[in-house]
Image: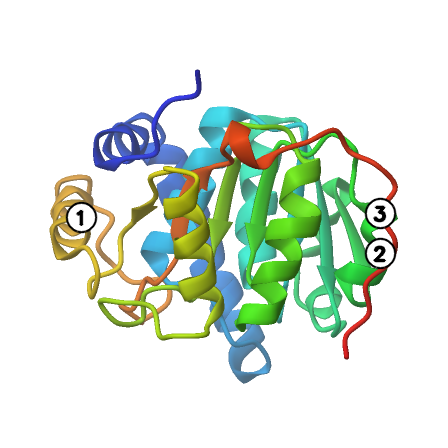
Amino acid sequence: MPAAIDLAHISELYRTHRDDLARVREHMRAHRRHTGHTMTPRLDDLEAEITYLLLRHNTPATVVEIGTAHGWSTAWILHALHDNGTGHLHSFDTTDHAPQHVPHHLTDQWTFTHGDVRTHTHLIPARTDHLCIDAAHNGWFARWYLHHLLPTLAPGIPVSVHDVFHQRRALPFTEGAVVLAWLTAHTTNFFTASAARAPHHHQALTDLKKQLHLTEPVHTSHRNPMIYFHLPHSATRARTAAPAHHAR
């Protein structure tokens, strides 16, 4: 059984990988200065760091990222794979901004596909060990990947979904509302460091970062709306060649 994604586990990962995380934070801070106004980071510091730490702990062979924007999350993921010394990232986005911003020294472990992931499901590796989703934040896209993508993946893999808890509750008809209902139906817990949804988690990790001298911001934002969970066994099935699904 994989380790539960909870406050205790995340806190332990902060302590275990503190020095490497401090180094990557410095790299990403410099990267932020170098790119200036040409890049808009999507993940806040806690979200980016938790993503990095989970990848360091799980050492996945294959990571899939749906939604890259300017490549901020992509760079964090690639730093984790680089520090692991193994793994490959497959990213998908309808825009091609990320290749212009991801640091060149990280790209050996990266394959970027420009286009709608729903028409490129054949390029998603049959064995995906970690999935990050930060794309269209509406209900229809969530229903697509919940019913057409996630069931084809291996049970138990870590999954993250961004932009769920900007507020205490996900707004009706949004991606977050659909995903949360799906998790409830599959009796699956999730973790979030959202200050709006889970202020105790947010404060505990903020206090821990102070103890570890990781307080200087990399990206000055404090919304942290991402959720993390393990893909439930009840939601998976054998992978088959699925027809392409096009946006309407």
In primary-sequence order, the first of circles 2 and 1 is: 2
Q: Which residue is mark 1?
A: 201
The quarter of the displayed image where residue 241 is located? top right
Residue 207 left/right relative to 139: left
Instruction: Estimate the x, y position of residue 99 in percent, counting from the top left.
Output: 74, 64
Q: What residue is rendered at 34% in x and 34% in y? A: 5
Question: Marks 3 and 1, Cα distance to the nearest angstrom?
Answer: 39 Å
Q: Nearer the viewer, residue 142 or 87?
A: 142
Position of 178 relative to 188 (above/below): below
Considering the numbered disc 1 on the image, is that residue within a helix, a strand or a loop? helix
Q: Amino acid at mark 2?
A: His
Position of 171 relative to 164 (above/below): below
In primary-sequence order, the first of circles 2 and 3 is: 2
Front disc: 2 or 3: 3
Task: Tell me whether the residue at label 2 lies in contact with that at label 3, contact meaning CB atoms closer than 8 angstroms.
Answer: no
Pointer 2 local density, CA inside 10 Å: few below 14, some 14–19, many at least 20: some
Q: Which residue is mark 2?
A: 120
Q: Which residue is mark 3?
A: 242
Instruction: Estimate the x, y position of residue 123 in percent, counting from the top left.
Output: 85, 47
Considering the numbered disc 2 on the image, is that residue within a helix, a strand or a loop? loop
Pointer 1 local density, CA inside 10 Å: few below 14, some 14–19, many at least 20: some
Q: Amino acid at mark 1?
A: His
